[in-house]
Image (spheres, grey):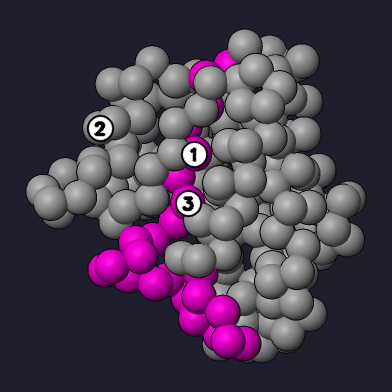
């Protein structure tokens, strides 16, 4: 069984993330993250969940996300977010990795496929983002899932009303990945 680290994006006290259509990214990410944890633990996967903007020790009063993940012995790291754009027509799902060609890309493709097919979101693909701390500073395969665009009315509707479907798709992506490694 894979051990899973779940990181809902942003921080309830310090940074709500993207805000649009009456929603806050921090709340959506936490709701989906808690449901992923519940689903995965329900089928026997040990999970750890931390939502904090202290990604690598910058804010001593908050849990250190990357440091905790690296010390925990988990097998994979999944950060959950909502995308946003100035152009309200931008929509869809994308999953980010530090670099392509490894286990992280395989995990990203599995999660991406499950979300796109389950929620009929636009497939924006798997993309390299070596600049993101949670992808760069973690030692296990790590992905950052941009579930959908909070700034797009249609996507925001899904983010508000279909959180369990997003969580279940992420969970299925994780189990698909485990079958392939």
- Locate the C terminus by quadrant: top right
Question: Marks 2/3: CA distance?
Answer: 16 Å
User: Label 1 belongs to which residue?
Assistant: 6
Disc with the residue nearer the chain's start (2 vs 3): 3
Q: Are marks 1 and 3 in contact (CB under 8 Å)?
A: yes
Closer-to-camera residue (55/1): 1
Q: Is residue 91 visible?
A: no
For discs 2 and 1, the disc positioned in front in the rendered view: 1
- What secondary structure is marked by label 1? strand
Q: Is residue 156 above or below residue 79?
A: below
- What secondary structure is marked by label 2? helix
Residue 97 coordinates in the image, percent (x, y)? 53, 42
Looking at this view, name the residue that lies furthest to the left.
60
Circle 3: is it few (<14), some (14-19), or many (20+) Cα within 10 Å?
many
User: Label 2 belongs to which residue?
Assistant: 67
179 falls in the magenta region: no
User: Label 3 belongs to which residue?
Assistant: 8
The residue lying at 47 percent from left, 51 percent from top is 8
- Region of the chain picked out in magenta, as a range: 2-25
- What secondary structure is marked by label 3? strand
The residue lying at 28 percent from left, 67 percent from top is 13
Closer-to-camera residue (159/35): 35
9 falls in the magenta region: yes
Circle 1: is it few (<14), some (14-19), or many (20+) Cα within 10 Å?
many
Corner quadrant of residue 100? top right
């Amino acid at each position: 069984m894979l051990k899973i680290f779940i990181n809902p994006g942003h921080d309830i006290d310090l940074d709500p993330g993207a805000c649009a259509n009456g929603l806050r990214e921090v709340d959506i990410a936490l709701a989906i993250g808690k449901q992923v944890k519940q689903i995965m633990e329900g089928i026997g996967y040990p999970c750890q969940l931390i939502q904090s903007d202290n990604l690598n020790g910058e804010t001593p009063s908050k849990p250190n996300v990357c440091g905790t993940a690296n010390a925990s012995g988990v097998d994979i790291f999944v950060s959950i977010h909502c995308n946003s754009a100035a152009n309200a027509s931008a929509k869809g799902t994308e999953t980010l990795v530090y670099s392509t060609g490894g286990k992280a890309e395989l995990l990203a493709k599995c999660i991406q496929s499950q979300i796109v097919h389950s929620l009929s979101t636009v497939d924006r693909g798997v993309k390299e983002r070596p600049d993101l701390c949670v992808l760069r500073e973690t030692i296990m395969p790590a992905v950052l899932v941009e579930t959908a665009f909070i700034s797009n009315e249609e996507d925001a509707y899904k983010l508000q009303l279909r959180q369990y479907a997003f969580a279940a798709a992420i969970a299925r992506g994780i189990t698909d990945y485990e079958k392939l490694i």
